[in-house]
Amino acid sequence: MAVQTKAERQAANRLAHFQKRQAERAARGPRGLAESWMERARAIAATREKSGDEEAWNDLSRTIANWVARYEQ
């Protein structure tokens, strides 16, 4: 088995943690899954921001704004 770098290990741990929490929240139905995906989206946007990519936050904001506009009527 290949040796993992610290970054690879951290990424694997984050993914495993997300999958565990998503399975727990799935037991609560669609609301739990939505919470899980929102949490993951924020984490990804924050990670991208640290890498100098602020567009991820803009894209997430537009996506949520579109969803709100569709369902608040």
Image (tube, rainbow, N blue to C red):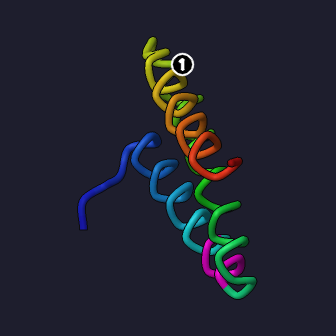
Residue at (72%, 71%) from the top-left corner? Answer: 31
Q: Main secondary structure of the magenta part?
A: helix
Which of the pair 69/29 is nearer the observer?
Answer: 69
Q: Which region of the structure is painted magenta?
A: 22-26
Residue at (57%, 47%) from the top-left corner? Answer: 70
Q: Mark 1 = which residue?
A: 50
Q: Is residue 58 above or below residue 41?
A: above
Q: Is residue 53 left or right of residue 29?
A: left
**Residue 11 painted magenta:** no
Q: Position of residue 71 (x, y in %)?
A: 64, 52
Q: Is residue 24 above or below residue 48?
A: below
Residue at (64%, 63%) from the top-left corner? Answer: 34
User: Residue furthest toward the bottom?
Assistant: 27
Q: Position of residue 60 (x, y in %)?
A: 52, 33
Residue at (53%, 38%) from the top-left corner? Answer: 66
Q: Is residue 57 above or below residue 68?
A: above
**Residue 23 painted magenta:** yes
Mark 1: few, some, or many residues within 10 Å (few <14, many ≥20)? few
Which of the pair 48/11 is nearer the observer?
Answer: 48
Q: Quadrant of the N terminus?
A: bottom left
Q: Position of residue 54 (x, y in %)?
A: 49, 15
Q: Amino acid at mark 1?
A: Lys
